Amino acid sequence: MNPIVAAQPCSSCVRRWKAYDGHMASLKMIARLGLFLASVAISLAITLPGTVWAGQLLPTTQIPLGVSIVQIHDDPGRSAVYAIDRVHSRILFINPEALSVTKSIYVGEDPTGLDIDEGGNVLYVANSGDGSGTPGTYRISLVDLNTQSVVTNFIIPEIYVNFSLLHAVNVTAGRQGRLYYNAGYDLWNGGMARAMDADTGDDLGEVAGIKSVMLATFEGSRLYGQYVYYGNLGQMGVWDISSDDITQTGSYGYSPYSDDYGWRYTNYSISDDERYVAYGQTLFASTNLSCQYGVLPEL
């Protein structure tokens, strides 16, 4: 293993960022927690990370897919990777050992985000396209990973934000029985993330004006994302989601607002021990965003 050694702006010892520890671990860190691979989004093959050396992630294997994909997610309980084929509204089931796509299923119009529940048996898929062309038909699909089939759909409540209809673009699983989603950047001059009962699909209310990809810790106690804090300016935020009484516990005004107003990056990831969060190209302490350990150009 060749871990990345990060810089240390904080007054503490040098930390090691766990970037690879064998069989699919690096893909888990990159894909499971919402960090997109830019090369995957525009290519027809998925690249499995290999060795980290001198701060660069070196690929070892490519799996031809035949389609462009927009998000990937590994399955920590199975030898499987799931990918969104947005053009054909499908989820691809990929076997990283056989280096092949084993199955694909239709999930709903224009899928854009996905995550696995805490139990590891349900894949949630955010479909940003409407179901029937009328308000109140936007949905999140639930895929049974044991049968690899859609078992039900949860309908997004009919809510307007600045004359834009709420729908699901990004989705994140929290603790058992809880799900969080937002409409990305599709809501005119605004953002909204909401909580949902993952067992019934019932709406549990607004979380915050989050517009970016979101990240929940493994045990589902904290939620990270870029949110609207003034006008249409964005900054990093942290919320306590250990109960339904959700409260914001931290924020940080990153990145610079001169050219992107706080919306430059679309990636969040977290280390296996939950001590570090990566956003953009910067490594942060997960419980104190003002503490930054350095820049990782490969993110």
Image: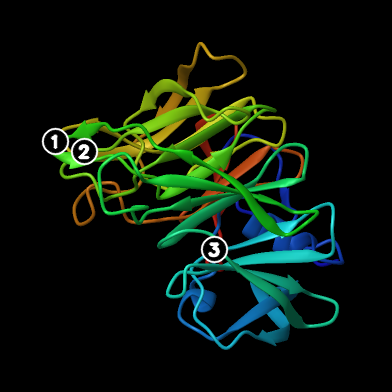
Please tell me whether mark 3 sits on a helix, a strand or a loop. loop
Quadrant of residue 23 in the image? bottom right
Q: Which residue is mark 3?
A: 299
Q: Is residue 173 left or right of residue 108?
A: right
Q: Is residue 147 left or right of residue 190?
A: right
Please tell me whether mark 1 sits on a helix, a strand or a loop. loop
Amino acid beneath label 1? Asn
Q: Which residue is mark 1?
A: 162
Q: Alpha carbon of mark 3 to alpha carbon of mark 2: how far?
A: 27 Å
Amino acid beneath label 3? Leu
Viewer-proximal residue, 94 or 277? 94
Q: Residue at x 33, y 53 (%)?
A: 132
The colouring scheme, among rainbow, by chain, secondary structure or one colour, is: rainbow
Which of labels 3 and 2 is toward the front? Answer: 2
In the rendered view of the protein, which quadrant contains the N terminus?
bottom right
Q: Does the residue at mark 3 contact the one at mark 1 (Cβ under 8 Å)?
A: no
Q: Residue at x 16, y 42 (%)?
A: 189
Other residues around mark 3 within 10 Å, as few (<14) / some (14–19) / many (≥20): many
Task: Give the percent coordinates (x, y) of residue 157.
Answer: 35, 32
Q: Which residue is mark 2?
A: 190
Q: Is residue 22 left or right of residue 126?
A: right
Other residues around mark 1 within 10 Å, as few (<14) / some (14–19) / many (≥20): few
Which of labels 1 and 2 is toward the front? Answer: 1
Amino acid beneath label 2? Gly
Q: Alpha carbon of mark 3 to alpha carbon of mark 1: how far?
A: 33 Å
Task: Give the percent coordinates (x, y) of residue 174.
Answer: 62, 32
Q: Does the residue at mark 1 contact the one at mark 2 (Cβ under 8 Å)?
A: yes
Q: Earlier in the sequence, mark 3 or mark 1?
A: 1
